Image (cartoon, grey):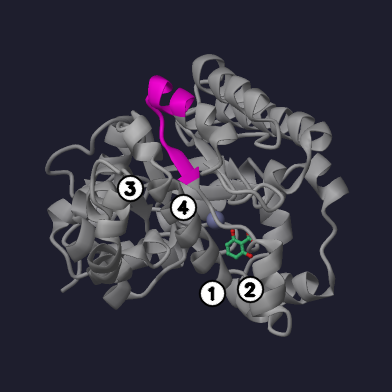
Amino acid sequence: MGSQVVVGGRKAKCSEWGAIVGPSKKGSGCVRVIAIEEHFITPLYREHVIPDEFRKFWLSSRSDVLGHDISEQYADMDAKRLAAMDEAGIDVAVLSFGAPGPQGFGPEIAIPMARDANDRLHEAVRRHPTRFAGFASLPTADPAAAVEELERCVTTLGFVGAMIHGHTQGSFLDEKKYWPIFERAEVLDVPLYLHPTAPHPAVMEAYFGDYEELARSAWGFAVDTGCHFLRIMFSGVFDAYPRLKIILGHLGEGLPFAMHRLQEHSWQAAKRRGLERTPLDYIRENLLVTTSGNWYEPAFLCTLLALGADKILFAADWPFEANKVASSFLENLSISDADRERIASLNAQRELRL
Ligand code: GRE
Ligand code: ZN
């Protein structure tokens, strides 16, 4: 069963973008599309992160498959990015700094790197206010500075949340020193997107030392990020900040598939630890997921059945994925058009107040 609606308000068949800002016009046959895991990079970041030999191989072979130059698109926040969005019918992209961003550095580098990225992102949103929105980049190596930057980004720059790229040089967010970040996100009523990065250094060595091709997007990202979310959950963060929402990409980094065993084999231990709710409760109440880079309908249907259509938000993962593949996946999913519209944009409009 294909879709009865056209995904993407900017497609030729649909009304002009300006006419459908806000909820899609009923009966127009067009669905607004908001993509929320779309990355950019800055010149300062490029000074500090030089691709190694494997990374160069990966970037070039992946670019060949996708039909665009990942490095070139990564740096663009104007015409090239917009053209690729237009071609795929993506109306709005919520942009975020690429991984590991400031999470890869100590405070001396991370603080100026995050501020610079956020200021550049703010400028890009000002240039294209109907097309872009922003997730803040946070210098987590200095938690107090991260809180301050989150506050600045949301209240002054108008950003709709923040993205954190996994561990900060080997330390995870369940550590109490990071909790003020969760506290401020809850007060500001914005979600935190927990995005993958290369796994913890010890895991990199023990699991992936001889198999670097498995360490990142093929497998290791999901393992590290899913585990990171569970550490946050078991530490009691959601008891302390019950209205906090964490977003995971890639259809929840495997968690929807694991929910039964996780609940069955840890709810008593969770209680023993003093948690107020069960693991499943937190997953149902505090987690949102996106479709980024996981174009596999069986996994999508598992996610839909496990979490429901109100918890899934559209994302492509540009420039590491092709926008057109992302939007045609959404367009062709065997789901109702009502659910398709929730995933395409209604959930993002509600959760990010777009
Ligand atoms: C990344 O390095 O950040 C990355 C990949 C592959 C897919 C998505 C992504 O290497 O963010
Ligand atoms: Zn991503």
In the displayed structure, 228 sits above or below 34; it is below
Number of marks in picture: 4
Measuring 40% from the left and 20% from the top, which residue is drawn there?
187
Measuring 52% from the left and 26% from the top, which residue is drawn there?
180
Mark 3 or mark 4, earlier in chain: 4
Query: Where residue 55 appears, x then y in whole percent?
Result: 76, 70
Cα–Cα span, label 4 and label 2: 20 Å
Circle 4 sits on which residue?
231
Note whether residue 115 is visible.
Answer: yes
**Which residue is at the far bottom?**
210
**Which residue is at the far top?**
156
Amino acid type of the residue tagged 2 in the rendering: Ala
Note whether residue 241 is visible.
Answer: no
* Badge 2 element: helix
Circle 3 sits on which residue?
287
Q: Is residue 227 left or right of residue 282?
A: right
Measuring 68% from the left and 45% from the top, which residue is drawn there?
103
